[in-house]
Amino acid sequence: MELPESGVLRSTGRQQLRRYVIVGGGITGLAAAYRLARGQRRTGVRAQIVVFERERRWGGQLETSRRQGFAIESGAESFLTLPPYAEQLCLELGVELQRPNRGSLGWFIRRGGRLRAVPPALAALAGPPSPGLVLNGLLSPPGWLRMWLEPLLLRQGLNEDEALRPFLARRVGVEAAQALVEPLVTALGGAGDTSVAAFPEVVEKSRGSLLLSMLAGHRMTSERSPVSGGMGGLVSALVNRLASDPAVVLRAGTAVEQVRLRDGRGEVVVDGEALAADAVILALPGPLAAGLVEQADPALAQPLRQLATRSMTTIGLAFAPGAVNLPPNGGGYSYPADEGSGVRYCTWDSARWNNRAPAGSQLLRVFLAGADDRDDDILIRLARTELRRSLGITRPPLFGVVFRRPEAMTCWQPGFRRAQENATRRAWPGLVLAGSAFRTGGVSGCVAEGERAAAAVLEHALLV
Ligand SMILES: Cc1cc2nc3c(=O)[nH]c(=O)nc-3n(C[C@H](O)[C@H](O)[C@H](O)COP(=O)(O)OP(=O)(O)OC[C@H]3O[C@@H](n4cnc5c(N)ncnc54)[C@H](O)[C@@H]3O)c2cc1C
């Protein structure tokens, strides 16, 4: 296939040329390309770095739609400062960051048809669950007391493969697990069938107590988001930087069809044509990576497929000034697993972040489980009904935007660790697997993954 003769190819002479291919232009793939481009200058091994993205748009699950002065995220609205990789990347790229607004740090749980405030500290899973939880009806007095017995329970070895729901029930009691902790975890992208391995900061690691490690883990982490352009601002900054690097070739709107090994060298197939690669990074959710290697290596495809994903639909609703009266000190609410009829949580983006809506206007988002294929109009109506019932919003929105993310969120179901190990062990030299299937931590974890993948490619390059 035809690729431009980039500056690096011309300057080094064909003999020593290498080519690294990255499949997937989400945050993992873009971070990998950025680190590869910078890292290879130090190793002295020069290569062309080609990034293939099947959509015309870069960023994968990160997408910010701009309309009438609103910046509407399709998924992530922020990233965590721990692990610190995304924040560090923004600093390097000159992307200015903001913290969530002070008056929006609280969270609500909608249970039994009512919004019940979780104390602000607990909303960040960082403070002692106070008696207020009993007063506002979220927990019964015995449920609250049972939860507080948790630090006294005998320490048991942590089985990272255990699903979250039985783990929580065992530690804090069934009532607190269902009514309090699980809805908070839902808002972090988890579910009852997620394994505890997906929440390394909040599990009983060194301290032996879930509540105490919550206190310790989350005191240190916080959220950040780009001041302008939303999360799309980070994507544009990365793409602009890569586009100006002569060693990098960016190919959007180009799906890789197959990845295979030929005569000890990697090869990707695009538009039916093979392109040789000294190293290939698959920066994709597990099942998509499985599809690409299936033909060449079914034994690698099998564990990759076990790194299962779930779908999400996000509906953003924009409101004119005065149309919405939100409860004070809140950033959103979530549902316990057995309530909500498909709605998992709702975020009040314009309350949490500056520059997401014109002055006085409000932007709210409703998150549904699954990639709902009903018409946009039906989904917008459904979101309006949800907001009328939960927040009393009766005025029509200025507009609504629907994003479907099929098979986007990695589930981290029990058995995940084994599948990760099997896939990594089976991958041939020069093939690097990366992305949310291999590390928790959302966007920051994905940036870390991109950097790990780049380091692995550079190490491989020095060996061959
Ligand atoms: C609704 C939602 C809310 C979220 N909220 C948060 C949050 O608040 N904070 C947070 O930190 N994280 C959040 N996340 C998670 C975070 O967005 C993801 O973990 C991260 O963006 C995944 O990035 P990635 O690059 O690994 O994968 P992706 O973004 O999925 O990128 C993979 C890319 O590969 C491309 N591709 C697929 N097949 C091919 C092919 N054959 N050839 C070429 N390209 C291909 C895809 O088009 C895609 O662009 C959220 C996710 C969702 C869905």
Image: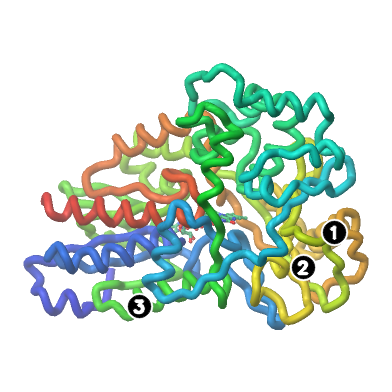
- Residue at (60, 45) in percent of width and height: 310
Inspect this view and state whether residue 308 appears. Answer: no
- Residue at (66, 62) in percent of width and height: 403
Q: Which residue is mark 1?
A: 387
- Residue at (72, 54) in percent of width and height: 106
Q: Which residue is mark 2?
A: 317
Residue 43 left/right relative to 242: left
Amino acid type, mark 2:
Leu
Residue 338 left/right relative to 444: right
Q: Which residue is mark 3?
A: 243
Q: What is the spatial separation of the Cα atoms under label 1 and label 2, in whole angstroms?
A: 10 Å
Q: What is the spatial separation of the Cα atoms under label 3 and label 1, in whole angstroms?
A: 42 Å
Q: Is mark 1 within 8 Å of ligand 1?
A: no
Q: Position of residue 30 (x, y in %)?
A: 39, 64
Amino acid type, mark 3:
Ala
For the residue pair 399 and 224, the one nearer the viewer reads as: 224
Amino acid type, mark 1:
Leu
Earlier sequence position, callout 3 versus callout 1? 3
Res 46 → quadrant: bottom left
For the residue pair 258 and 411, the one nearer the viewer reads as: 411
The answer to the question of whether label 1 and label 2 lie on touching residues, with beta carbons closer than 8 A, is yes
What element does badge 3 sit on?
A: helix
Q: Position of residue 441 (x, y in %)?
A: 49, 49
Q: Quadrant of the N terminus?
A: bottom left
Earlier sequence position, callout 3 versus callout 2? 3
Near mark 1 (Cα within 10 A), the count class, few <14, some 14-19 or many ≥20, is some
Front tag of 3 and 1: 1
- Residue at (51, 26) in percent of width and height: 208
Q: Position of residue 171 (x, y in %)?
A: 63, 25
